[in-house]
Image (cartoon, helix red, strand yellow):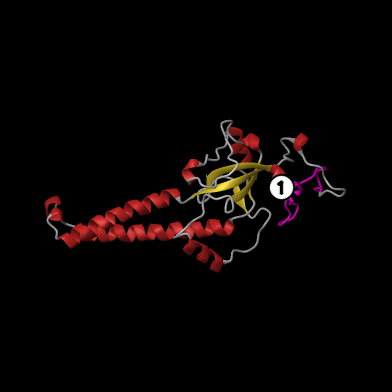
């Protein structure tokens, strides 16, 4: 059962994920761009980046993670920075490198988050350009001598830039619900029971996960 394979929660950067993360391993539906834009707009008020319900599912071999990894049973009520980061050991980095870190969903959310961050980067650039234009060619004394409205505009712009940069730096982080892949070829003793007619590859007499797109590993079934 999927719930029995759940290890707990961690966080990861889904905009700049670990090398080898693959979205759509078992769900390759085309992106709905209208949905992506709608999600991106909703992020302006609440990203839901640290809730049990909106955490993204990821499947891996726990032996790939650093020994110090501590899974959380829930992330409800926590700030994203309170959740341990998913970090891989040296062997794990090698194992996931070839599209072997399975993200079981969340591609729309990931693309929406990218759009959300891109929009903030654009606003950051425009704000910086407005400030540069206001103080261009002026000495420090001349800047301090600007009228109150001009100074307020510059100061508010500088504060806005700090807020935007902080959001950009932290928006990539999202909580993930981690599942033990179980039937790893590295740990054959951990494989779950197979059905009467397991999917076999043509040239290897051993079970394989997801022979076709859309097929989840058997022990991930509800």
Horizontal and vertical percent position of residue 86 = 55, 40
SS assignment for the magenta stretch, majority: loop
Find the residue positioned furthest to the front: 77
Find the residue positioned furthest to the right: 196
User: Quick one: 84 or 101, which is closer to the camera?
Assistant: 84
- Residue drawn 57% across and 60% down? 108
Number of numbered tags placed on the structure image:
1
Residue hosting label 1? 2
Where 8 sits versus 45, above or below?
Answer: above
Where 120 sits versus 103, above or below?
Answer: below
**Residue 94 is at least partly visible in this image:** yes
- Residue drawn 28% across and 57% down? 157
Secondary structure beneath dot 1 equals helix
Is disc 1 surrounded by few (<14), some (14 to 19) or many (20+) residues within 10 Å? some
Horizontal and vertical percent position of residue 152 = 21, 58
Q: Is residue 216 left or right of residue 20?
A: right
Q: Quadrant of residue 207?
A: top right
Q: Can residue 201 be found in the magenta stretch?
A: yes
- In magenta, the rendered stretch is 200-222
Q: Is residue 134 left or right of residue 85?
A: left
Where 183 sits versus 30, above or below?
Answer: above
Horizontal and vertical percent position of residue 17 = 53, 47
Q: Can residue 27 be found in the magenta stretch?
A: no
Find the residue positioned furthest to the top: 67
């Amino acid at each position: 059962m999927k719930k029995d394979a759940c290890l707990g929660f961690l966080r990861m950067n889904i905009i700049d994920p670990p090398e080898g993360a693959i979205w759509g391993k078992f769900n390759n539906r085309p992106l709905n761009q209208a949905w992506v834009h709608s999600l991106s707009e909703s992020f302006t008020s609440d990203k839901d980046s640290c809730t049990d319900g909106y955490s993204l599912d990821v499947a891996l071999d726990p032996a790939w993670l650093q020994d110090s990894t501590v899974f959380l049973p829930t992330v409800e009520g926590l700030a994203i920075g309170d959740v341990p980061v998913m970090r891989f050991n040296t062997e794990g980095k090698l194992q996931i490198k070839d599209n072997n870190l399975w993200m079981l969903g969340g591609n729309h959310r990931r693309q929406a988050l990218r759009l959300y961050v891109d929009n903030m980067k654009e606003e950051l650039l425009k704000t910086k350009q407005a400030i540069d234009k206001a103080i261009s060619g002026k000495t420090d004394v001349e800047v301090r001598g600007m009228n109150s409205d001009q100074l307020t505009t510059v100061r508010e712009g500088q504060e806005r830039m700090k807020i935007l940069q902080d959001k950009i730096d932290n928006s990539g982080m999202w909580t993930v619900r981690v599942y033990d892949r179980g039937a790893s070829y590295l740990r054959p003793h951990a494989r779950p029971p197979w059905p009467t007619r397991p999917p076999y590859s043509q040239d290897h007499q051993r079970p394989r996960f997801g022979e076709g797109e859309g097929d989840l590993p058997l022990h991930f079934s509800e």
